[in-house]
Amino acid sequence: MTTGPSAGSARLPALGRQAAQQVARELTKATAVGRTGDLHVSGDPGGRLRVVHGRVLTVSTVGAPGLAELLARPGRKVPGAAERRALEVMAALDAAFAIASGWIDGCFWTTEIDLDSTNLDRAAPAPQLCGVEADRLTAETERRLRALANSRVSPHRNRLARTERGESLLRDCTAGQRREILLQVDGRHRCRDIAFALGRGLYPVTVEVSRLLAERALVVPPGSNGLAAALVPSSLPRSALPRRHRGASGINELYPPRGR
């Protein structure tokens, strides 16, 4: 994340830049007072968080596929109510990651929002709303940034190319997300391009790309729109790359264990 000088927060170290901290503080205050409005985050890719009664209802950004793109993924069946709800949460968390892993310049509120378009009532109690709790959104975004601290790849900036090992892996790779990603790598595509092309979340795509980079199956070519950039300040302790596990599509990222 590139925003400005470090703010040195012990509370949100992975969101430890001034502009990113401002976004986190605004969400915290919105929760405390039950605020309703749109929190606009300027930057690249930037985005918008729709907050209703202090709860983050949706997060939108050009930096990651939204709910419509996730639903339109080839092969996906029409979801039931529970699966759609899970996809809505996944899209919101993924969009927050996309915003936080980019460049943040600042944020501001607008209060004139169309609640009728989302079938909401200003008088409705907060527990009846869908969406994500603001503190959970912030904590999960920090967790994802920390999980990728070792990857040294920006999902927005770095273009990717296959190595000889990657070509060999592609020939031998069975069907699945890894093969889909390898097929999309052409020296021009970035993680976010691949995520849109596949209709998959930006975070799970970036996780798999980070593994392929660690295996030397992929490389960031010289001059490919800048050197690889860390997602978090380099002074932070870095954790190992996320382990491969079931649910690589990203659905298991929805509800990580509370003690994690």
Image (cartoon, helix red, strand yellow):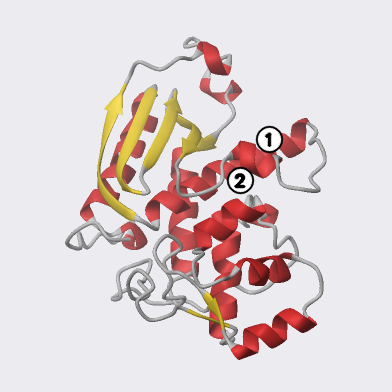
Residue 241 visible at all:
no
Q: Position of residue 82 (x, y in %)?
A: 76, 35
The mark found on residue 90 in the picture is 2
Q: Position of residue 9 (x, y in %)?
A: 25, 59
Residue 36 visible at all:
yes
- State which tag comes first along the sequence, 1 or 2: 1
Which residue lies most toward the bottom here? 164
Quick one: 187 or 44, which is closer to the camera?
187
Could you say whether the residue bearing mark 1 is in a helix, strand or loop? Answer: helix
Q: From what the image shows, is residue 201 above or below residue 128?
A: below
Q: From what the image shows, is residue 152 above or below residue 60?
A: below
Q: Quadrant of the N terminus?
A: bottom left
Could you say whether the residue bearing mark 2 is in a helix, strand or loop? Answer: helix
Q: Which residue is depicted at the point 17% across and 62% down?
A: 5
Q: Which residue is depicted at the point 58% across and 43% down?
A: 91
Residue bearing mark 1: 85
